[in-house]
Structure formats: C-alpha cells, structure tokens
Image (cartoon, coloured by chain):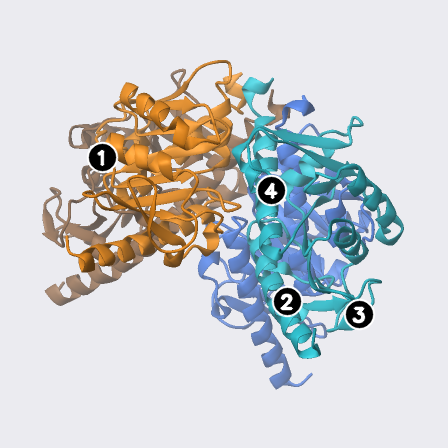
Chain colours: A cyan, B orange, C brown, D blue
Amino acid sequence: MSRAFVKETFEALASQLADVGRHCYERGWALGTSGNFSAVVRKEPLTLAITTSGVDKGLLESRHIVAIDAHGRMLQGSGTPSAEAMLHLAIVRSRGAGAVLHTHSVWGTILSEATADGADSLTIEGYEMLKGLAGVDTHEHRERVPIVENTQNWTAAAPRIETILREHPEAHGFLIRGHGLYTWGKDLAEAKRQIEILEFLFEVMGRKRGLAWQL
Amino acid sequence: MSRAFVKETFEALASQLADVGRHCYERGWALGTSGNFSAVVRKEPLTLAITTSGVDKGLLESRHIVAIDAHGRMLQGSGTPSAEAMLHLAIVRSRGAGAVLHTHSVWGTILSEATADGADSLTIEGYEMLKGLAGVDTHEHRERVPIVENTQNWTAAAPRIETILREHPEAHGFLIRGHGLYTWGKDLAEAKRQIEILEFLFEVMGRKRGLAWQL
Amino acid sequence: MSRAFVKETFEALASQLADVGRHCYERGWALGTSGNFSAVVRKEPLTLAITTSGVDKGLLESRHIVAIDAHGRMLQGSGTPSAEAMLHLAIVRSRGAGAVLHTHSVWGTILSEATADGADSLTIEGYEMLKGLAGVDTHEHRERVPIVENTQNWTAAAPRIETILREHPEAHGFLIRGHGLYTWGKDLAEAKRQIEILEFLFEVMGRKRGLAWQL
Amino acid sequence: MSRAFVKETFEALASQLADVGRHCYERGWALGTSGNFSAVVRKEPLTLAITTSGVDKGLLESRHIVAIDAHGRMLQGSGTPSAEAMLHLAIVRSRGAGAVLHTHSVWGTILSEATADGADSLTIEGYEMLKGLAGVDTHEHRERVPIVENTQNWTAAAPRIETILREHPEAHGFLIRGHGLYTWGKDLAEAKRQIEILEFLFEVMGRKRGLAWQL
C-alpha cells in the first residue's frame, strides 16, 4: 500500500464515519458526545481511523477522525482518540473486523440492566430482522448478546473482552451494563446495518416488556 | 405500450419507489436493509419494478430498483431482486395491485406476536384512521389483518398466501409473524397511504396494551 | 378589502398552511392523508382557506389549498374541500377563530378512548405547558377538553359541536372519540402553538398511565 | 472589552443559541414556544444573551435573541426577554455558568412529578452517560437532581433557587415540578451536552418504570 493510497483510504473512511456518526446521533443513539466509531484503514501494519473524544456527534466531520496504530498511538490528525480505542482494537484483533461501532441508546441501556439478577447475556430469537446480522439466513436463529460489566479502564479490561469474544464466537455484538452496544462488521456498511438491526430488536424486546399481555 | 413508454414508466416508478423507501427508513420502518417495495410497470405481460436485496433504504436510489417478469426473472437493472419477490407477484396477481409495500416496524413486529396463543388475525375497529384504507368510508369498520407464519421459502409459500388472500377478500394487508407488514394499493400513493394508516393503528393498539387502564 | 388584497392574503395563508401541514406530518400527527387545516382569509363575507381531501400531508403545497365561503362552497382552487369543512366553519363562527387545525395523533387517539366508560371530557391540570394556551397565564389552570362522539356527517353534526363549544366557553380544543384533536387560534401561529401544547400534554398523560407508580 | 468585540460576541452567541433552540425543538423538548436559552456575552458588567418570549423555537433566529444586564433590563434587541430571565441570572451568578438552557420534555415533566409523594429530588446513578456531565469521570456517580416547586414569579423565587443551588453544590441541573429542566455549563457546548445527557437519562428512567420487571 502506497502512502498516497493509505491517505486516500483514511480520508474516505473518515468521511463515511462522520456520516454514520451523524446518523446515529439523529436516531438518538449517540447523544451528548457519546458513542464512538472506527474503521480499519489497513491491516498490516494495523491503522485504525477512529472518532476523537468529546465531539458532538450531530456536528461530526472528517476532521474529528484520527488514525491510530495497534497500540493506540496517534498516527494522524489532532484531538484525543476515544478512551475506548483499546476496546475497538481488541475487537478488530479478535474478529478481524473492518469497522466497529458503539452506541448509547435508551433501549440498549435499559436491556443491559434487565438481567441484573445475574444473567450475563440477552437472548433474541425468532425475528426476521435477525437476518440482517452477518451470516444469519433464517429467522430461526438464536442470537445471544453477551452483557459485560462496565469499567473506566478499557486498557486493563481488553483481555477480558477478548475472552468473552472467544467464548461467544457467534455473537454479532455485546452490551456493556448501563452503558451501550458494540457491534462490528467486515466493513462500515455491515457494521451500520448491524447497529440498526440490534437497536431495532432491543426496542422490540424492551417495549414488549411494558405490555399488559406480558404480565 | 411502446418500449420507450415502458422504459419511461419504469424510470418514473423507480424514482418514486426510492422516495417511498427512504421515507419508510426515516420513520424507522425499514432499518438495516429490511423492507422491500414494488410497483407494476405494465400488466400485459406483467413487469414489476422492485427493490434489490441488501440495500440500505436510507440511501435508496433508482439504480437499486430492477424490473422482473411474472416468474421473477430479471428484465432490467442489476443486483438481486428481493428474496420476497414471489410474494409481491402473488399479491399483484391475487389483488390486481399496482404497488406492494413491505415494512418491518417495531409495533408491527410486536403485534404480529401478540396473538401467539393461536389467533391468526388482528382486529382493528372503530378508528377514523381506518378511512385511509381503500374503499372504507366510515370509522365503523372492522379491519381483520391476517397473521401468517414466517418462512424462508416464499416461492413455496406463495400458494398459501394466495389462499389467505382469497379467504380474506376485504383485507388491506397482512402481517407475517415476527417479521412485518405487507400492504398494497391500486397505485404507489394508495399503498403508501395504507402503510402509514396501518403502522399508525398498530402503534395505537400496541401502546394501549401498555396502559394501566387496560389491566 | 380589494380583490388583489384578498388574493394576496389567500396565497400567503395557503403557503403557511402548507408549512404547518408538512410540520404536523413530520411529527406523525397527520399520516396517511389525515388531518386538515384552515385559516380565515377575510371575515366579511367569510372566506376560508382550507386543505383539500386526500392529499399526502408530507407533500402538501399551496396548490392543495382552496378557498370556500360560509356555506362550504368553493370560491377558488381545485380539488374537494375537506369533508370536515363544515366543522371548521362551525368553529370559526363560534369562536371567532382565525385558524383551525385538526390532527390525528397516536396519543390523542388513545386518550380520546380512555374515558370510554362514559366521561365526556379529559382534564389536564397543573402543567407549565398549559400556559401555551391562549389567555392562560399560570400552571394552576384546569383545562377541560371535551370529547365528542365521532360521525361521518359533520354537516348534520355541526350544531351539536356549536352546542358543545357554547357549553365549554373556556375550552381551547376538543377531541373526537377514536379520531383526533381540533384546536384553533386568533391566527395560524396561535393555533399551531396550541396543537403542539395539547399534543405534548396528551403524550405526558398517556405515558404516565403506562408507568408502574400509577398502578 | 471593546464595544465592537461585545457586539461581535453577542452576534455569535445569538446565532449559536438559535441553533441550540431549533435543535431542542426538533427533539420535542421545546414545543409550543416553550423553553428558553441564554449565554453570557461578558461577565463584567454582566451581559446575558437570552431568547425572547413567545417565539416558535422551530423558527428561532438570531433576531429573537436580546441582551440584558444583571437586573434583567434590556440592553439590545427587541421583544420581551423570557419571563424566566431572573432564573437564568440567578444560575449564572450562583454557578459562574457561561450558558443556561431550559427545556420542557415529556419525560422531564413526568419524572418531575414521579416523586410527588414528597421527595424533592431524583437520583440517577450507575450509567455511563453520567460521564457527559462536567467533572464526572466514572459511571459510579450518583447525580441528585433537585426538584423545585413551580411558580409564576421567578423574580420572587430567585433567592429560593439560589439556596437550592448552594445546598446541592454538585448538581448539574434541576427540575421544576410539572414544568421542565434547567441545566448550565461553562459554555454553550457544555450546556447543550448536559441537556442531552439529562434528557436521555430521564427517558431511560421513565421507560424503565413502565416495564413489567419493575412491578
């Protein structure tokens, strides 16, 4: 890969990440500077385009995206990479993902706590929408979304996340308790599709719990 | 019909289908590449303009619409016609519809399961909004929305759908369990109006079930 | 009033009505061609600008607005005036209103039925938002919203509505059971403000009924 | 500060306040001319840019923003400063805030009443989103949002608000019962972020109360 090509790829991905970020903001999934979004610029050596900290996602632009290496060190751009950059890198490493998206939605937050009696996953099954997850070709699919405890030290917690990803090889995403959703894909389009699928299914499951016939 | 006229009609319908698709996406009824939309280009021999598979409906454009014949074979455009094309064709055949729309909404999904105790339809009655359904001119109307089981083989299931449509000659749409809504109209404007009417009424009925006075 | 001035006033109001209509559509209060909107062009002799029937409010433009006289006869424009034009005229007559707006929202529909045990009004009290209703200058206000039965013959029902308006001289709007809200104002801005206030308060009241502490 | 610089600062802030106001309107947090927004133009002598009364926030423009002094007297612009200007000034004084935002949301209104059994605050704890509040760097934070009684005389009530702000030195906002939310920040971006964080958390807490597992 020539330097010019890497630069061009970075710029294209930065612009697409900004679009996805503003879209998530519009849907209410990335309010108050929450959420962070990344895409792989090149695999060898690993270069990741990722949103910087503290940016209003409704105003997200290419210039808010930086490039980091496999250790989270800045390669390009200005600003501070997201505090959860180590989590993005762990997912890229474990899953061979081309893009990683992280949202904070109302229903994701609520469902991440709904199993606070100890369960460490949420099961979604029988919905046609599950087919929007990569490799799923029937509604007769059971998606188990791991729920991991929240922390403020993702550098220390990255190995724990890698263990969970290994233990759930078929998971398309995971929830952090009281925090939000991570999903990924081979590229940004796949990851964006999965965010929409999972957020939709969280809303379906959350609303169903409020209905009289569930009592 | 001259070839030039057919081409022109196809292009106009493709553009209108793209508008309707983006609109459904905005409302949250076609997230994650879900939903598919079609309109009849000509009746004899049947030519149907229909969305291709796997397209982000928020980015839907004319070029994502293809033309197929009565057997689902591609006549024009590139991409794969929706896997549910046979269902669209069955509806056009049974109802003489000029347009068929299919959405995946939160409330449609929830209500399609609300009768999982065996009932195979949802009854909506007494609402002014029912007058938005073709041929209904009073709120004193009882709409029975059939609920059919989901499948991944719509080619095989098409005859079953045609039977249900025959058994419910007055139905303006049907739900597929855990999946979503199909409705149709003499043209795209009528089908779009019915999508909005039915999705609105699903939301009313779904929300009512969550309220205290319903207990 | 010169003819040129009347024409100019009509055109300005038609454009403003189209803006208000598209806005209500965006909020989900006028889906599926539902809702209708009017404004007084001149009082003597009465000329009312009003939306025509069957128009998609998301696509509402000035050309979908017609002018009618006090008897509902067309003075200008093409299309069919709303079937509820007689109701608009009755409100203009009874209240001296400069604009009348009618929406079909999910919460308005639900609340209009919440008192189906016989009550014929909905009481809203103690909210700061009530100050958005004309003449209300404190949250310590009790708004009683009459609920009237639905009908398909508003020409025949107009006197009944005028009676209800006389019996509730302080009401800022009324609900039609299973149908929607009517409100009005001295001008379009006031009527639009009241639609937003009442729809907001309906949502507050509707959502509160679904919450656990209400049981 | 030169007069030219003050004028320039006022104009820049007026434009930013208009953006924030229209944004809050879009989210449904400032319907029906509700909500008001301010930012400090200079500290010595205090000059505050603030929205005028009765403006449709969906149409908010710079020209709807005026400048007032520490006593609420008009310095620049036309229109009536918000009736709650004294409350904005009290917050600026007590907290050294650079911007103050006030919204009327559905969930804020509902939660402000949810403790009507006497409690005078709402506690939010354990959510990642809390980190969007200034100075909070962990989800293991307990935010106590004071709830104050509503009034129509904020000039008289300003000392009461200052007392509450002194008693809750760590509070990032407060609710007025049946009315809405006040929050503030060192600048407009921080205040806007906090509005989004608090409104998001109100929605999470409100929706959770409607769910079956909470019963």
Along the horizontal axis of the image, is B66 left or right of A124? Answer: left
Residue to which mark 1 is pinned? B96
Along the horizontal axis of the image, is B141 left or right of A42? Answer: left
Q: With respect to residue C193, does B203 lie above or below?
A: above
Along the horizontal axis of the image, is D61 left or right of D214? Answer: left
Residue occupying image coordinates x 86% and y 51%: A153
Along the horizontal axis of the image, is B29 left or right of C214? Answer: left
3D distance between C-alphas at marks 4 and 1: 35 Å
Q: Earlier in the sequence, mark 4 or mark 3?
A: 3
* Marks 1, 2: nearer the viewer: 1
Residue to which mark 4 is pinned? A133
Name the kind of residue labelled 2 in the image.
Ala
Q: Earlier in the sequence, mark 4 or mark 2?
A: 2
Regarding mark 3 in the picture, which secondary structure is present there? strand
> Residue D166, percent across and down?
80, 51
3D distance between C-alphas at marks 4 and 3: 32 Å
